Each structure stands twice: as C-alpha cells, then as structure tokens.
Image (cartoon, grey):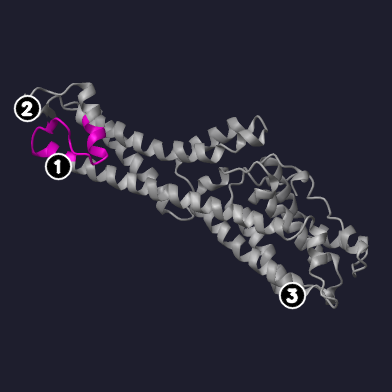
Amino acid sequence: MEWFILFVGVIIVVAALLETIWTTLWVGGGAGPITRAASNLVWLLLNAFRNHRLMVVAGPLVLTITTMSWLLLLWLGWFLIFWSAPTSLVASSSQAVADVSDRIYFVGYTLFTLGNGEFSPNGDGWQIATALASGAGLFTATLAITYLISVISAAVSARAFAAEVWGLGDAPAEVVAAGWDGKNYSGLALPLQSVASQLTKLSQQYLAYPVLQYFHSGEAAKSPIASLARLDQIVMIAAHGVPRGLRAPAVILNSVRSAVTNVLQSLPQKFVQPADDPLPVPSLGSILQRGYPVVSEEEFADGVRSEQDRRRRLRGLLNAHGWGDHGI
C-alpha cells in the first residue's frame, strides 16, 4: 500500500467535492477557489483582445471548463486511490492485476455509474471504495448538469432584461418623454417597476451562479451590463431631470436605484472598480424638443452629481466589459 498516494488521492477527491458543493449549493458564497482561478484566467485571456465577438465565447467556455474540472479532479483522485494498492483491482475473468490504463478505465466507468467493466475490486474495503466512487460520481455529475441548466436559464433571463430595457426607447431621454401623460411622468411607473423586479432577480442570480458574469453579448442591446448603465441613465433623468412634482413615484425610482446597486454589489470587485469619471450626464434633448417640462441644466447636473459614486462604478463595469460610453 502506497500511503502517500492514497493520501493525495483522498485530498483531491475531497477538494473536488467541496469545490462542486461550494460553487453549486452555496448561494452567495461565490465560486470555489479552483473554479474562480480558471474563470479568471479564461476571462483575462479573452478580454485582452477587446473583441466582442471573441468575448462572447467566454461564458460557455468558463462554464464548460468549470464543470469538466470537477469531474476530472474526481477521476484523478479516485484513480490515485485505486492505484495506491497494487492488488486493489483484478480482471473479473483471469484475476490478473489491473495495470495503470485499466485503473483509469475502471474509475471512469465507475464514476459515470456504468458499472465496473471487466474489472472487480479485490476485497471488502475496495468494494466499499468502489461504491463510494460511484456515489461521488453520480452526485457530482447530477450537480454539474443541474448547474449547467440553471446557468443557461439565468443567462436567458439576463438577455430578457436587456431586451426589455432597450425596448423602452431609442435613448434614455426618449424613454422618459414617453412616460409623459399630459400632466406628469407617471407613465414611467409601470415599465420601471417591471424592470426593477427583473433586476432584483438578476442580482440574486449573479450571486447564485458566479460564472454568469462571464456571459458576454456581442451587441449592447443584448448585454445586461450595458443595459444596467442605460437604465441608470433613464432613472437619472426621471429622478433629477424633470420637476419634482411631476416625477414618477419616488418609491419606484428608489427601487430601481436600489436594484442597480444590488447588482453592482453582487459582482466581483474586479468588475466594478470605480472609473476616474462617472457616466456622462444624459441629454435632455428629446424631452425639450417635445416641449415637455424639465429642470434647468445646472439643476439636473447637480442632481446627477450627487449619485456619482454608483455611476463611477457603472462606468468601470462598462469598461471592464469593453463597452465604454457608446454601449449605452
């Protein structure tokens, strides 16, 4: 019995299971260390080219590498465990001792619950180990498949959020202008309430599925990141660009701003490093052209400036994803 090899194998198996549980079941715990390191490396390499078409593959690639790493680590760990004892496995027909390739085959066959092939565990202890390996494989594979489906569903929800934000109007000021009902801007209440609800759900999905942050869209109109900044521009006009008595209900405006902040807090700090300057002050041109009431440019700029901390983080987020101001 090679005790050191057995010890290393057990450590790798435990690490693989903890990594899987950490990433899939610990809501709010972020990704496990191995998953986080692999994800950061993939993102760093693809983001270096600043090509949106290339960055689109980051999410699927990170998700594939993540789930495959759990299974491969588990495979390696159990292989080392069965390799630690020369007579742990024997051929079912000839009783010949299994070689290295036979053990790799046996462990893979067992982990994916296909049986144990043409080999059998030699002794009670190795029979128990085989059962544990089969259970660990089933557990990890089930979590991996469930995680894949959940992340893809969350990515679709994120794109739906982006589509709804961009569907409100061609420019932030036009969205606010469309909310004018002849007396006030209360027409904004319903669409903003709907978007805030989606955004709150999205913030929790970013916490539950850390790899979701690497899903990048090739178009700003399909990007939840660009849409988040665009939504903030809309809220800035609705909250500071129109006269106080004519604004949409404050509770809804505050709800949207809170939801935006929650998303920023749910993302890793490397993505939301504050930029030197906040997002540019949005234009009120479309509202002025229609003759709807707005505040003075000075009052509007002062109001927007009071929220520059969040807007600097939003600009930093845009820059991290290669959008810049043109993305909103």
Earlier sequence position, callout 3 versus callout 2: 2
Above or below, 180 relative to 175: below
Q: Is residue 46 visible?
A: yes
**Residue nearest the viewer, comparing 174 with 75:** 174
Residue lying furthest left in this view?
94
Q: Nearer the viewer, mark 3 or mark 2?
A: 2
Secondary structure beneath label 2: loop
- Bounds of the magenta segment: 106-130
Mark 3 closeness class: few <14, some 14–19, many ≥20 residues within 10 Å:
some
Inter-mark Cα distance, 1 to 3:
64 Å
Q: Are marks 3 and 2 in contact (CB under 8 Å)?
A: no
Above or below, 32 relative to 264: above
Image position of 15 (left or right of 125): right
Q: Residue at x 38, y 47 (%)?
A: 145
Image position of 48 (left or right of 141): right
Q: Residue 298: percent from the left, percent from the top?
A: 92, 61
Q: Residue at x 29, y 31 (%)?
A: 8
Amino acid beneath label 3: Pro
Amino acid beneath label 2: Ser
Q: Which residue is mark 1?
A: 128
Location of the N terminus by quadrant is top left
Q: Name the mark on residue 249.
A: 3
Amino acid beneath label 1: Ile
Secondary structure beneath label 1: helix
Mark 2 closeness class: few <14, some 14–19, many ≥20 residues within 10 Å:
few
Q: Residue at x 84, y 54 (%)?
A: 281
Q: Residue 136: percent from the left, percent from the top?
A: 27, 44
Q: Which residue is mark 2?
A: 93
Q: Residue at x 17, y 35 (%)?
A: 116
